[in-house]
Amino acid sequence: MTVIPPEEQTPLLAPENAPSPSSHKNTKPLRFTVLCIIFLLTVEFGSFVMVPPGTEILESIICRQYYDAHDPNRFPGRGKIPERDCKVDKVDGEVALIQGVLMSLYMVPSVLLAIPYGQIADNPKYGRKFVARLSLCGILLSGVWEALILWFSDYIPVRSLWLSPIFMFMGGGNGVLASMVCVMITDVVEPGQRATAFFQLELVTFLAQFLAPPISAWMMETDSWTPYLLGMALCFASAIPLLLMSETMPPGVDTEEEEEEVNISPETPLESSDSSSKRVNKTLPRSQNAVHQVWQSWKFILSSRLLLLLPTFFIFTIGSRQANFLLLYASKRYGITIAQAGFLLSIFSAVNVALLLLVLPAVSTFMLSRLGFSSNRKDLWLARFSITIGTMGCFMIAFSPNIPSVVVGLVVYTLSVGLLGLVRSLITSFVETHHVARLYSIVSIVQTTGVIVAGPMLAGLFKLGFAFGGEWAGLPFLVGGGMHFVVVITLWLVRLPKKTEMEDPSSPEE
């Protein structure tokens, strides 16, 4: 749960005044990036702290209801039932059903509303911060609803948890919130440091995911509600850095011009607007004017470069989800326990931290300062290298005959972890500033769709691979490698506009 409480003094549901030109100029990149990191660390750590106790609380509720219905004399009273006695198929099945449906429902608001909220964020009347606040309010209400259902489970059906995503229609949920954070970083950070900023955000999320569960597990030894409420309190506390952030939307976009968007040629170097293009014909019927305005507002997405790069988020998201099956794959194929296979996640984590914290930022700086690359060219070449090496890692894991070769393949694959940050930075440079929020909304939808498709697809491949036996056991990684290879081809087809490739205008075109 990522949440923000409604403040009494600061209106969250009313549109803010259009940001003044000074509001963006006075935003210090370092200060803003630090606030974003604090915000993400607080909200992500709180969210991951809540996951284990939330699952245990849900299981205990369903377990109590099961025994009250089928064997009321075994555990009389309202005391806690030992966890080992809750490992019943019907209990586990109901927990899995509730959580599985809930995870899917969480994605619905982001998929349906990412585009409308993206357009609102690009409107100077509202801006990015307004949408981010609204998203957090909706997520907060959703989390409060879930806590109330769990607390009053004796009076409210536990499946009422499925209603919690309704609150996320206020602001669009997690997908829209994540997009707004990326948009605000893009507004403030210089293009040459944009990819590094995205690496830092990924690292924060990863560290929260890595550190929160063991802390939560330690606290759960005495009580499940303590870590759950602590996580909720941290999510509330994330409102503080958000409120300290200033509006980042760059000035200079007139509201009327935004509504009557000018023509953008997909082949112009930076997809810039042509101020001499035709405006909406005032003599047209209102409905035709509305359609025309929508078309003008979104046709930038038809850029040949964007059409090549956007599928990257879908394909790589599906391919990267194969890591979720790593423990089960190693345990089953090589005859080791899941606990023994856990060291693979430690290796994965260590390489991730080193890559995002040290290697990629250092290489980015070297390419910019020593090799004279422009930010776009640097991002493109790093993305090409990342996906190529990641593809090799997938195939190495798929065909590994033993554990040592799996470790080598995993290290090689992990070198591709920065790809999405690089591609996100790259596509940002291909659109006008007042299109960035809409572009990231599309990216959010594409990634969310990839997550939805990846789960059942990779689970089916995993089952099919072990049914075939032998080397086919690595089928999920084999298919993942094939999908990564499609991204390799896509990135090598992308050509940068000549004037953005390098600072030296005489350099050859990509």
Image (tube, grey):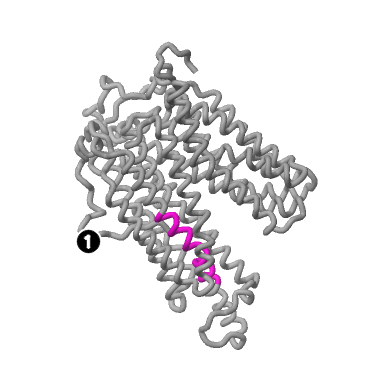
SS for tag 1? Answer: loop
User: Label 1 is placed on what type of residue?
Assistant: Glu
Residue 304 appears anywhere in the view: no
In this rendering, position of residue 105 left or right of residue 400: left
Which residue is at 47% across, 31% downward? 364
In this rendering, position of residue 292 left or right of residue 458: left
Q: Position of residue 126 (x, y in %)?
A: 25, 44
In this rendering, position of residue 443 left or right of residue 69: left
Q: Is residue 54 on the magenta stretch?
A: yes
Q: Position of residue 393 (x, y in %)?
A: 65, 37
Which residue is at 70% across, 44% downward? 406
Q: Position of residue 9 (x, y in %)?
A: 20, 58
User: Bounds of the magenta span?
Assistant: 42-59
Q: Position of residue 1 (x, y in %)?
A: 43, 58
Which residue is at 54% across, 74% downward? 60
Q: Above or below — where is 410 with respect to 87?
A: above
Write down the quadrant of residue 152 in the picture. bottom left
Q: Is residue 415 on the magenta stretch?
A: no
Q: Residue furthest right?
A: 470
Name the residue beneath numbered marker 1. 8
Most foreground residue, 86 or 189: 189
